Image (spheres, rainbow, N blue to C red):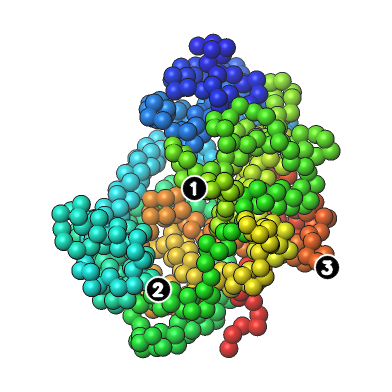
Amino acid sequence: MHSMTNPLLDFTDLPLFDQIRPAHVAPAVDALLADAETALQTVTAAGFPADWLAISKVLDVSSERFSRAWGAIGHLNAVADTPELRAAYNEAMPRVTAFWTRLGSDERLYAKYKAIDTATLNTEQKQAHRNAVRNFVLGGAELQGAAKERFAAIQERQAELSQKFSENALDATDAFAYYAEAGELEGLPEDVIAAARAGAEADSKPGYKLTLKMPCYLPVMQFAKSSALRETLYRAYVTRASELGDPAFDNSALITEILALREEEAKLLGYRNYGELSVVPKMADTPEQVVKFLRDLGARAKPFGERDLADLRVFASTIGLADPQPWDWTFVGEKLKEARYAFSELEVKQYFPAPKVMAGLFKIVETLFEVSIRRDFAPVWHPTVEFYRIERDGQRVGQFYLDPSARAGKRGGAWMDDVRARWLRPDTGVLQTPVAQLVCNFAEGVDGKPPLLTHDDVTTLFHEFGHGLHHMLTQVNERDVSGISGVEWDAVELPSQFMENFCWEWDVLEHMTAHVDTGEPLPRALFDKMTAAKNFQSGMQTLRQIEFSLFDMLLHTEYQAATAPPGEVMALLGKVRAEVAVMPSPPFSRTPNTFSHIFSGGYAAGYYSYKWAEVLSADAYAAFEETAGASGEPNIETGRKYRQAILEAGGSRSAMESFKAFRGREPQLDALLRHQGMAEPQPA
Ligand SMILES: [Zn+2]
């Protein structure tokens, strides 16, 4: 189909979101796939030069068109879903996925990349080239004969096992139901009771159906006054998908097989264990470095966790729970939180009308990063979508769509996505500026008032904008390492979590809030309560995350699949708990059996990344705290340095190099601990 009739094939400038129809999807994918296939054949032909620019001109130009068009389709599928579009999207998906898999494992392409003389490359190209070769190697491109076949078999079996793992976890969760009597429900919120009643009715049962799904399980643990009821659900919850539950859903054997295959995969690629393999494309250098990081943070957090637990024990005895059991802690914690920091989210919301928040966010970004943000025009998919341009010295730096509101046909949650990356195009020699999608799901305003954001909404907006700035403020010209591309994924949350800090800054909030009726800024007393509640039990929560992270890394380094006796996985968790945890765990708890992040979610030997990125972002933000002016205003020099070292550099060098360029040293734990109320002096 000619580009004049298919908007998905028009690459003149921005995507024609207003013209794309489901009928355009299949012909566009066909045309672009054929084009990309031809490009792949061209550059891998024997006579084609092993030259970065020559390959890029053909293959990258073609594959970039493909991903831009497919990105536009995927975007519409996420924000303006219709049955027709979904069908077209799902129909094309397998062909698209298959092409990228083929591209990533093409031996001739790998050979061509390896033959490139890296002395001809600039710094950015060198980094992109290194990443490309590394990804081929980790994909098994260097393996031969039987090893290659075995590697492929392992990949296939792992995919089956992880799919089965998550099905078991889901099915075990879904299979449980407890039909309670009205008398057992005391303390539960009305809406939870109503949903439980409806659930029982749907099953033609008397009473109230309680389940292990979060919207039911969590409120029961938080609010149900009956300790016996909490115990029933708790026992079922922590034994899901284990040998202590329904054997049909037991994940125990899957866990040992997954671990054995990962170990084998790592050894085939020349690593001692899966932990070593996992950190290769990450910011962390070795598993040992990660383990040390986790242990250091754990040691610092432990006294605070112990204090949190002691507080809970004292408070528990005042509400008749002198000897709290595992199913009591959440309930006690909730009661203590209510007693200490009673304030209403509804009250807070009145101070955050969306336009005031947006203006506040733009102001910070403009001041800190020396840009201006202006309204701009582009074809959009819904009339409420806004489009902006970011300028510096009158020059366009980047552009973004902002789709703020929840509506039918739009996926929940919030995210940043790229529309196109900054790229000095090898075909035209023109510098392409980056474009981003910022998508949120805020509630619409009612009674003619503007939308009101919860403080969580505000934090989410800042978070996604941080990702957006990383994508849009980059100064890198090489597509695969510009902006967020090529950034190690244990570092990719640095710029996003960094921005969240501003939402807890009094000097910022004061100017970013205006009561929807009175126009008054957020009262200081309310802000203080919010801050205190934010750090409630942060010691225990930190230790819980460290327990998961350390268990994950040790499981992929110390655990030996070939020689491990039965029960070794739980024994290892027991050791980690003895070292890290303050909260006692009951012997029947089988949390690994539903730890989907590491057994079916891509976080294997990578769960530490959450805490890792938190440390980076907190430490980066501390540079602003250290240099702030007398009334808290951020220092422009620090903003410039952060922008240049972190945001502009993107993936063109390692995240550690970028961090050091900004901070002048390696990351330290102190800022995170301070932000979360775990600063010196430590409690006695
Ligand atoms: Zn994020």
- As rendered, which of 24 and 80 lies closer to the eye? 80
* Number of residue marks: 3
- As rendered, which of 230 and 188 lies closer to the eye? 188
Element at label 1: loop
Q: Residues within 10 Å of mark 3 (few under 14, many from 20)?
A: few
Residue 434 to residue 300: above or below: above
Residue 44: tell me if it is visible: no
Q: Residues within 10 Å of mark 1 (few under 14, many from 20)?
A: few
Q: Amino acid at mark 1?
A: Gly
Does label 3 point to a residue whose CB lies under 8 Å from ligand 1?
no
Residue 630, numbered circle? 3
Distance between the alpha carbons at the discs numbered 3 and 1: 37 Å
Element at label 3: loop
Element at label 2: helix
Mark positioned earlier in the residue sequence (2 or 3): 2
Residue 432 to residue 450: above or below: above
- The residue positioned 70% from the left and 52% from the top of the image is 360
- The residue positioned 18% from the left and 53% from the top of the image is 203
Mark 1 = which residue? 413
- As rendered, which of 64 and 346 lies closer to the eye? 346
Mark 2 = which residue? 330
Locate the C terminus and report the quarter of the image it occupies.
Answer: bottom right
Q: Amino acid at mark 3?
A: Ala
Q: Is residue 567 left or right of residue 559?
A: left
Distance between the alpha carbons at the discs numbered 2 and 3: 41 Å
Which quadrant of the view contains residue 425? top right
Q: Is residue 331 left or right of residue 430?
A: left
Which quadrant of the view contains residue 179? bottom left
Q: Is residue 603 left or right of residue 488?
A: left
